Image (cartoon, helix red, strand yellow):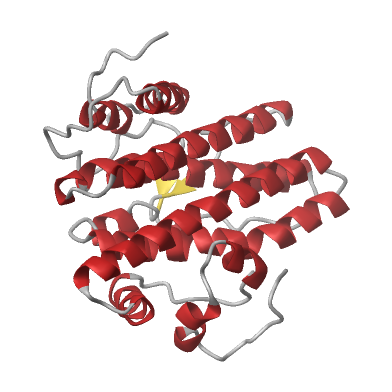
Amino acid sequence: MTSSVTCLGEAATAVLTTAAPLEKVRLTRLHATAWRDGLLSPDVPTPPPDRPARPDRPELKLPRDMPKRGRGGSAQNRIALLHALAHIELNAIDLAWDIVARFAHLGMPKGFTDDWVQVADDEARHFQMLETRLNALGSSYGDLPAHDGLWQAATETAHDLAARLAVVPMVLEARGLDVTPETVRRLRDFGDAESADLLQTIHDEEIGHVAAGRRWFVHLCAERGAEPVALWQELVGRHFRGGLKRPFNVTSRQLAGFGPEYYEPITPEIDRKPETR
């Protein structure tokens, strides 16, 4: 099936205003292919919606009201883990399309759009993978509650592309690089090689997303005459309320070009743990 939209803004809005997860995935993959094939103009005639459409399920709760997830190897605990990750990936689809459309007026190079459309496509594929695995375990996305805090970063940084890049790929996605190796190890110990392999694939591809965030953040710094490390630290301090946490996956962060000179000076020294590899 070919895309019926003619420009990038229509594609982004179509995804962001679609509530059904699998339809959001389908449209993302369709429009990403159309963009790569040169079938969409770069025009964004109207700004994206302030919030993306969401399905009736899962029930969205405040982060503090979410049930604690067990760390054991039971099917129930693994389903809860995969469901939480699927929710993150669904939000990540919308975050990628939002950054493309919301900041189009800045006239960034085409490579910027290429990168974030590809990120949207990756996140859609990741959601598909997680949903397929949930189905194999007798569940599906929407069966468990999820928290509604993920779009807060988009709202907080809607006014400034540098802030968006500093917080979403360079804090939130980088945190995924930190915690995934231990999760993969635990899944293998539990005998769930399929879920472990899936998460390893997602981790490896997320390195490229963090790299894209850092690359375009540095590009903006050059345009503004700002020093990247200092500006990143300032923006994270102003717009990210969660605080940076150890341990860091220094190896994967370095592969993304994201060195410790950025994050170590503003991370509390308490509860220092060995860095992950």
Front residue of this view, candidates 86 and 168: 168
Residue 208: horizontal and vertical position, in percent? 53, 52
Q: Is residue 130 left or right of residue 235?
A: right
Looking at the image, can residue 265 be seen? Answer: yes
Q: Is residue 148 left or right of residue 200?
A: left
Residue 226: quadrant of the picture = bottom left
Q: Quadrant of the N terminus?
A: top left
Q: Is residue 171 left or right of residue 100?
A: right
* 71 over 243 or under it: above or below: above
Residue 50: horizontal and vertical position, in percent? 20, 44
* 71 over 254 or under it: above or below: above
Residue 177: horizontal and vertical position, in percent? 60, 60
Residue 174: horizontal and vertical position, in percent? 52, 63
| Extreme-top residue of the structure | 1
Front residue of this view, candidates 109 and 73: 109
Query: At x 40% / y 28%, what residue is drawn?
Result: 36
Query: At x 32% / y 62%, what residue is drawn?
Result: 219
Residue 246: quadrant of the picture = bottom right
Q: Quadrant of the C terminus?
A: bottom right
Q: Is residue 258 left or right of residue 248?
A: left
Query: At x 27% / y 69%, what residue is drawn?
Result: 222
* 214 over 202 or under it: above or below: below
Looking at the image, can residue 64 be seen? Answer: no
